[in-house]
Image (spheres, rainbow, N blue to C red):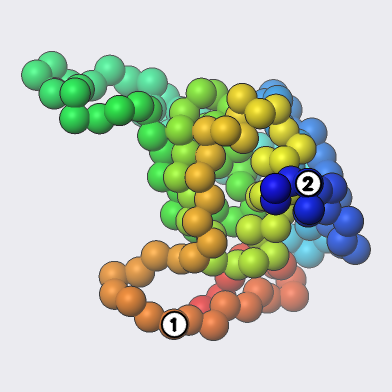
């Protein structure tokens, strides 16, 4: 239902982009966001960290680890921002549970999930709130120079 009601996202200052080498379309801020700018220029956000993350996810579990206690390969993205790691890991076949507190970033991620291949989008569960050590109400805003980064 969400995809029917909200896709495609037609918001000034937002652009859809196919992100290589993954079979995904991400919605990004056209200007004023360092993550979006990096992706729009054909680069992967934090490419070294992403490479290490994917390497770690592909490693076998230690011997003697009881695999019956876990159901599937899972990546938890806390502070998903515009979804750079979320989309990359889901496109590689991992289940993703993501948390993002900024509504504008949530809209970008959801629209990208609607526009992407269902084999990717079906692997993602997005929660529209942040995580903390204790329950709290926070007011989130972004700096004009970096739209997608939340400041508490």
Q: Residue at x 81, y 40 (%)?
A: 17
Judging depth in this view, the residue of 11 and 118 nearest the camera is 118
- Is residue 74 visible in the rendered structure shown here? yes
Residue bearing the label numbered 1: 137
Q: Which residue lies furthest to the front in this view?
A: 1
Residue bearing the label numbered 2: 4
Q: Which residue is drawn at 44% across and 82% down?
A: 137
Q: What element carries label 1?
A: loop
Q: Which residue is drawn at 13% across and 23% down?
A: 65
Q: In which quarter of the image is residue 57?
A: top left
Q: Quadrant of residue 75?
A: top left
For marks 1 and 2 on the same chain, the one whose residue lies earlier in the sequence:
2
Q: Residue at x 35, y 27 (%)?
A: 72
Judging depth in this view, the residue of 85 and 95 nearest the camera is 95
Residue 45 position in % (x across, y down): 63, 43
Residue 115 shown left or right of residue 102 in the figure: right
Q: Residues within 10 Å of mark 2 (few under 14, many from 20)?
A: few
Q: Is residue 40 above or below residue 22?
A: below
Residue 93 position in % (x across, y down): 51, 23
Q: Residues within 10 Å of mark 1 (few under 14, many from 20)?
A: few
Residue 82 position in % (x across, y down): 65, 52
**Distance from Cα at disc 1 to Cα at disc 2:** 31 Å
Do labels 1 and 2 touch, CB within 8 Å?
Answer: no
Q: What element carries label 2?
A: helix
Badge number at residue 53: none
Q: In this view, does 8 lie above or below 99?
A: above
- Is residue 112 visible in the rendered structure shown here? no
Residue 126 shown left or right of residue 137 in the figure: right
Give the mark toward the camera: 1 or 2: 2
């Amino acid at each position: 239902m969400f995809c029917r009601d909200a896709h495609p996202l037609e918001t000034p200052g937002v652009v859809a982009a196919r992100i290589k080498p993954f079979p995904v379309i991400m919605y990004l801020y056209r200007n004023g966001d360092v993550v979006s700018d990096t992706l729009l220029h054909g680069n992967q956000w934090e490419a070294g960290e992403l490479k290490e993350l994917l390497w770690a996810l592909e490693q076998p579990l230690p011997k003697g680890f009881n695999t019956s206690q876990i159901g599937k390969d899972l990546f938890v993205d806390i502070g998903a921002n515009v979804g750079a790691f979320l989309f990359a890991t889901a496109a590689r076949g991992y289940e993703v549970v993501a948390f993002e507190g900024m509504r504008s970033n949530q809209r970008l991620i959801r629209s990208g999930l609607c526009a992407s291949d269902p084999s990717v989008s079906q692997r993602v569960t997005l929660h529209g709130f942040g995580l903390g050590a204790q329950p709290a109400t926070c007011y989130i805003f972004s700096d004009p120079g970096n739209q997608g980064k939340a400041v508490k």
